[in-house]
Image: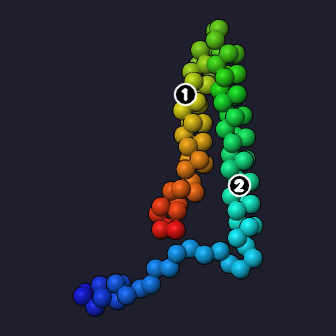
């Protein structure tokens, strides 16, 4: 058991590094993903607002679905916003 701990202590842990020529491409992909997430978040809030407006009279279930959807949209937007920071913090970059 102690042998495994000794081996684990000596494993190198280098910082993340983009393959040659891919640094700009990866940055583009991340920025495109964030832009798509921003667009989907805006459309999700618009859809939730529309559901709340339409469901105001005699369709209270639709209005409640729209109101509860706001929490999910904000949660999803938070994950997209924090994605790079979280991965960088976890991977030690």
- Pick whichever, 79 or 20, lies toward us: 20
Q: Which residue is mark 2?
A: 31
In the image, residue 24 sits, relative to residue 30, either above or below, namely: below
Q: Quadrant of residue 59?
A: top right
- Pick whichever, 47 or 88, lies toward us: 88
Q: Which quarter shows the N terminus?
A: bottom left
Image-based side of 68 in relation to 12, left or right: right
Image-based side of 92 in relation to 40, left or right: left
- Pick whichever, 74 or 27, lies toward us: 27
Going from N to C along the chain, the mark reached first, 1 or 2, is 2
Q: How far across and how far down the image is residue 65, in percent? A: 59, 25
In the image, residue 92 sits, relative to residue 21, either above or below, namely: above
Residue located at (68% from left, 58% from top): 30
Q: Quadrant of residue 54?
A: top right
Residue located at (52% from left, 62% from top): 88
Q: Residue furthest bottom?
A: 3
Q: How far across and how far down the image is residue 5, in percent? A: 29, 84
Tell me, for residue 68, which label it has, or none.
Answer: 1
Mark 1 and mark 2: span between their CA atoms? 29 Å
Labels 1 and 2 touching (C-beta < 8 A): no
Q: How far across and how far down the image is residue 27, in percent? A: 70, 62
Disc 2 crowd rating (10 Å Cα; few below 14, some 14-19, many 20+) is few
The kind of secondary structure element at disc 1 is: helix
Q: How far across and how far down the image is residue 31, in percent? A: 71, 55
């Amino acid at each position: 058991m102690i042998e495994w701990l000794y081996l684990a202590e000596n494993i190198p842990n280098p910082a993340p590094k983009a393959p040659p020529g891919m640094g700009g491409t990866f940055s583009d992909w991340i920025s495109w993903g964030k832009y798509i997430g921003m667009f989907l978040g805006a459309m999700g809030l618009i859809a939730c607002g529309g559901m709340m407006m339409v469901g105001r009279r005699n369709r209270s279930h639709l209005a409640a679905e729209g109101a509860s959807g706001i929490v999910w949209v904000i949660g999803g937007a938070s994950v997209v916003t924090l994605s790079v920071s979280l991965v960088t913090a976890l991977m030690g970059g």
